[in-house]
C-alpha cells in the first residue's frame, strides 16, 4: 500500500471516529448546542478555501512518470 493510500485510509478512519464521538456527545448532551446562526456562512468560506488550496495543489504538482510495465 502506498503512502498516499495509507494517509487516505488513516484520514477516513479519523474522520469516522471523530464523527461518531461528536454525534454521541451531542446525543448525550455532553456540550451545549451551537447558537442559531453562529456559523452562518462559515461552510461557504471553508469550502471556498479548500477549493482554492486544491486548485493550487493540482496546478503546481508535477505529473510523475509511470513506473513499471503494464
Image (cartoon, helix red, strand yellow):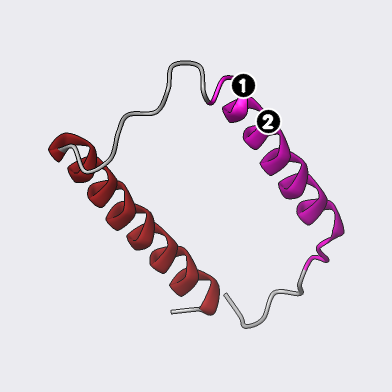
Query: Residue lying farthest bottom?
Result: 68
**Which residue is at the front of the view, 12 or 19?**
19
What residue range appears in magenta? 39-63
Give the residue drawn at x 18%, y 44%. Answer: 24
Q: Is residue 66 left or right of residue 24?
A: right
The label shown at residue 41 is 1
The answer to whether residue 15 is above or below residue 30 is below
Observer-nearest of 60 and 43: 43
Mark 2 = which residue?
45
Residue drawn at x 61%, y 80% as measured from the top left: 69
Q: Main secondary structure of the magenta part?
A: helix
Vertical side of 15 occupied by 52: above or below: above
Q: CA separation, marks 2 and 1?
A: 7 Å
Residue 33 relative to residue 52: left or right: left
Is 25 on the left or on the right of 34, as rendered? left
Magenta segment includes 52:
yes
Residue in the image at 39% along x and 28% along y: 34
Above or below, 11 against 33 in this view is: below
* Dot 1: element: loop
Which image quadrant for residue 11?
bottom left
Amino acid at each position: 500500500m502506498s503512502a498516499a493510500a495509507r494517509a487516505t485510509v488513516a484520514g477516513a478512519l479519523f474522520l469516522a471516529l471523530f464523527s461518531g464521538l461528536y454525534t454521541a456527545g451531542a446525543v448525550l448532551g455532553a456540550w451545549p448546542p451551537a447558537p442559531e446562526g453562529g456559523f452562518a456562512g462559515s461552510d461557504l468560506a471553508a469550502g471556498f478555501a479548500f477549493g482554492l488550496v486544491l486548485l493550487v495543489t493540482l496546478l503546481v504538482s508535477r505529473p510523475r512518470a509511470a513506473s513499471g510495465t503494464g
